Image: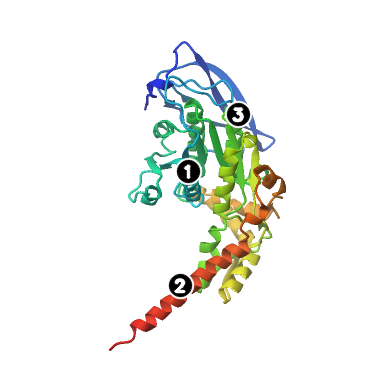
Amino acid sequence: MASTFPAQLATSSRQNRRRRMIKLVPTGGSISWRSNLVPERLVSSLTFLSLPSSFSSGTSCIRPVVKCAGQVAATSAAVNLAPGTPVRPTSILVVGATGTLGRQIVRRALDEGYDVRCLVRPRPAPADFLRDWGATVVNADLKKPETIPATLVGVHTVIDCATGRPEEPIKTVDWEGKVALIQCAKAMGIQKFIFFSIHNCDKHPEVPLMEIKYCTEKFLSDSGLNHTIIRLCGFMQGLIGQYAVPILEEKSVWGTDAPTRIAYMDTQDIARLTLIALRNEKINGKLLTFAGPRAWTTQEVITLCERLAGQDANVTTVPVSILRLTRQLTRLFEWTNDVADRLAFSEVLTSDTVFSVPMGETFNLLGVDPKDVVTLEKYLQDYFTNILKKLKDLKAQSKQSDIYF
């Protein structure tokens, strides 16, 4: 499996670059970070070495190594690779462009005049809506690292908001794919990299996805790329399918008895703040956390939806202890390990964690007025107002259609 870089990215074969090998090693029952730098001669092709078959707390994991003909910059500063056409600062590659957050990033960037390229997996139903908006769509798959380099040619900034699908092993995209993407970005001279992570991921190594997010943060920080890491608490959009729609359709609403509080944020606000951060040189190398104006429990969200919908919810409460027991049972079988990894969030739900941070300093840094950030009350009120109006219109049309002459 090999790929050749464009001629303008080629460098002298007499130059050396450093190969970075990172290991996660157990220390006292937890994962620690170790970085070894090994000098290696440049080779003429791109080769990816596979990871061990498992990734879990308490086991050793060697991150994949990328070898390429492009010279990796020795410093974290952006470099101009010559000869060749200079890369426009407005050229952006959005990874995970069809997701809840990714599509908002694309839409906002296009509205602000950026030249947006979207990395999308090959699929039977093409992402035509991205093209309709004015973006360029390129097919690649983080699970196939050899498809990544071509998507980075001519790109100034990578915005990574991708995550694996529920049916995929967490480590496949969120670990192996992200490491390959970061290493390719470094080799191709990408001048800025924005990575979305999860708030409190450093405090929950027992949750595989959060552990991987934290380790990816460390890997990106050590890569030398000019980067910004943005940790997120929760999306308001996710509450529509989880609570609003079931209440309107008089179906069961599933919740837990957990005390966890989450400061949900509108993905449109996240996209707006991200692009402001992209243009702010003071943000380079920083770790930011975006949170909504208030942290909500599950029951508070359900109560708010009931009030706005004008009807009671049929709530089915699942005790967190049941989730934890289910996770323990699914860990007994190899074919259910992925389910167990996702149920690991039950550990977070029992920890009294508050997914929120004060945003005053971040707003000052970005020059943003806190009043411009949408509250959950306003977001859900707009949703229910629009939906209930449409339902009334549909009922009116239905009554009219029942009249015959």
Q: Position of residue 36 (x, y in %)?
A: 60, 23
Q: Is residue 145 above or below residue 134?
A: above
> Is residue 312 positioned above or below 76 on the image?
below
Which residue is at 59% across, 72% downward? 308
CA separation, marks 3 and 2?
51 Å
Q: Which one is closest to the eye, mark 1 or mark 2?
A: 1
- Answer with the quarter of the image where residue 265 lies: bottom right
The reply to whether the C-beta atoms of the residues labelled 1 and 2 are less than 8 Å apart is no
Q: CA distance from mark 1 to mark 2?
A: 33 Å
Res. 216 image quadrant: top right
Across and down, in percent, residue 152 comes to 44, 33
Looking at the image, residue 14 sits to the left or right of residue 131; the answer is right
Element carrying mark 1? loop
Numbered mark located on residue 113 in the image: 1
Tag shown at residue 222: 3
Residue at the spot of label 2: 390
| Residue found at x 58% / y 52% | 269
Mark 3 against mark 2, which lies toward the viewer? 2
Q: What whole-number distance in Å separates the C-alpha atoms at marks 1 and 3?
A: 31 Å
Name the amino acid, label 2.
Lys
Residue 125 rendering spot, x and y as whole percentages: 34, 51
At horizontal 44% and vertical 49% (from top left) the residue drawn is 98
Tell me which amino acid carries mark 3. Answer: Asp
Q: Is residue 126 left or right of residue 279?
A: left
Residue 370 image offset from top left, x and y in percent? 67, 53
Q: Which quarter of the rendered picture does the C terminus lie within?
A: bottom left
Which class describes the residues within 10 Å of circle 2: few (<14), some (14-19), or many (20+)? few
